[in-house]
Image (cartoon, helix red, strand yellow):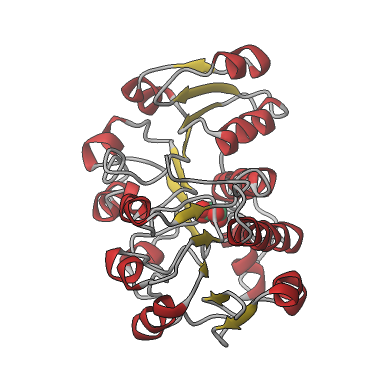
Amino acid sequence: MKPYIFITRKLPEEAIEVLKEKYEVAMWDKEDIPVSKERLLEEARRADALLTMLSDPIDETILNAGRSLKVVANLAVGYDNIDVAAASKKGVAVCNTPDVLTDTTADLTFALMMAAARRLVEAAELIKEDKWKSWSPLLLAGQDIHHKTIGIVGMGKIGETVAKRATGFDMNILYHNRSRKMEVEEAIGAQYVSFDELVAESDFIICLTPLTNETEGLFTRDVFRKMKKTAIFVNASRGPVVDEQALYDALAEGDIAGAGLDVFDKEPISASHPLLKLNNVTAIPHIGSSSVETRMAMMELCAENIDLVLSGQAPKTLVNK
Ligand code: DGY
């Protein structure tokens, strides 16, 4: 009997062709609706491999249900949706998709910062709603990006690539990370500072840290109060790193000038969420790595990892320690 792979979302056929040649492959048939917990549990019981999305909670129940489960390949660099400790205990390999999405996610992060600073979404809406009366001196005047200070929280590969983008805009680059990155300091001229210093001195605070027990709720009201009143906060990591109510209050009461958000506490965020009522919020639906080329590369990497594990070899991008 061929090993069985279950894919939790409808992916393009060409992305899974290579798996289909060697394995029995089944796929959830919806592109934009996640698989139900019941179906996932049912599939996990018989699967040798799961190809999962960041929106699928792969908890102990799912992992323990798997009698022959050998690998969970997550279509994301982040893997906070997976109980990695429980997977390791069961001997299940967990894989993610680093590297292939670094440039694309850095591009989007930088674009989101620029869109929030220069009020691009507001400007596009104004013109489409036929509200453009005339050229006027301060119409949708935003903030400059060039020669400002960018503060990157979480200097992983994406952070480093955002910093590289910032050099082209003559920005002063600060960063905070669990450990210093001497090679980034030398190559890009980024300066390591404490979290408090970064928050107080940056014009743009860019959150790129993974969601862990240590980073959950990192951005509190107190932290937003320490930022410049002209600061723009950008989150392209995970929603729960931020206390969303605190962010709302900070934006509504003028502690900071604006926010660019690709991620939210609860995804999808509802259009009636108070944050989305604020003009100074530029919000997009978790599309950090979403270019056709990159998403296809991520799918290929997941398929490759699954194939490697199922043929008894080490996967390319293993997460378990
Ligand atoms: C990921 O892959 O974890 C990021 O959220 C990219 O969008």
Which residue sits furthest left? 222
Give the mark count: 0
Please provide percent x and percent y for residue 281.
45, 56
* Quarter of image, res 76: bottom right
Q: Is residue 145 visible?
A: no
Residue at 50% across / 22% down in the picture? 174
Residue 252 left/right relative to 146: left
Quadrant of image for the N terminus: bottom right
Residue 206 left/right relative to 295: left
Residue at 46% across / 33% down in the picture? 154
Please provide percent x and percent y for residue 246.
25, 49
In the foreground, 196 or 129:
196
Residue at 61% across / 76% down in the picture? 129
In the foreground, 53 or 107:
53
**Looking at the image, is 152 positioned above or below residue 290?**
above
Please provide percent x and percent y for residue 38.
34, 85
Q: Is residue 46 visible?
A: yes
Which residue sits furthest front? 1
**Looking at the image, is 115 positioned above or below residue 153?**
below
